[in-house]
Amino acid sequence: MLVLSRKKGESIIIDDQIEVTILSIDGDTIKLGIAAPKNIDIHRKEIYEAIQLSNQSAAVGSEFLKDWLNEKSTEQK
Amino acid sequence: MSDSQTATNQPTTEKEGIYTFSKGIPGFHEITEYMVVQQITPFSLLQSALHPETSFIMIDPFVYYPDYEFELPQEVVDELAITKEEHVVIRNIVSWNKKAEHRTVNLVAPIIFNIDNHQAKQIILQNTQYTIRHPLQPNVAKGGES
């Protein structure tokens, strides 16, 4: 991992198009400003990982769906 | 389910067919095309033709949570080339469980469908009061099966 020291107000540039600026530092909380092209998705990592996990645990296979549909259509009758 | 449940503030005509998720969805980046199959209201399916083991049960969130709301970020409007509100359909992924009381819906990460150009994206709401696991129970539904 590349490690850089930055002060408040200073920035880094990633790949010519993503700029990350240190906006403020308060104790152990740092506020980052991120300027990036619109097609770049930016998320808090723990939230992104939680969505990944949620999707993975929600994914079902064709066998499951067959049973599920049977069960659902029975319920509707 | 009564007919009145289909009266939501979203279009009820969810077009079936192939939808492109240009970046996949979190956890499944490799899958960029899904088939949307309308199933038993309010459920529909998101199915990968190439990966039959990867399908998702989706729900019209407004049936269970009529007050569900969020602002669609401008970047998403641009990315999906949304030109008309009536082209937007919102669905949320359900984590199914044999026991009804353990079924949940992810309200943090709705899937946005542009039914006009068949582009779609699962977005992640920022600073939201919703959670990844809201209960999905008939007795909390508007006009539920009581």
Image (tube, coloured by chain):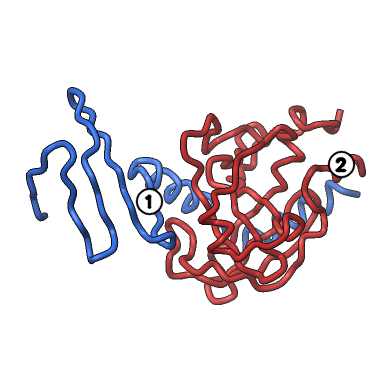
Residue A33: image x %, image y %?
Answer: 30, 43
| Chain corresponding to blue in the figure | A
Q: Amino acid at mark 1?
A: Ile
**Image point (72%, 47%), residue name:** B60
Per the rendering, the mark at residue A42 is: 1
Residue A24: image x %, image y %?
Answer: 23, 32
Query: Is B70 placed above or below A12 here?
Result: above
Q: Which quadrant of the view contains residue B122? A: bottom right
Residue to which mark 2 is pinned: B1
| Chain corresponding to red in the figure | B
Query: Is B36 placed above or below B6 here?
Result: below
**Image point (31%, 48%), residue name:** A34
Per the rendering, the mark at residue B61 is: none
**SS at badge 1:** loop
**SS at badge 2:** loop
Crowding near the residue tagged with mark 2, few <14, some 14–19, many ≥20 C-alpha atoms within 10 Å: some
Nearer-the-camera pick, B38 or A37: A37
In the rendered structure, the answer to whether residue B70 lies left or right of residue A70 reads: left
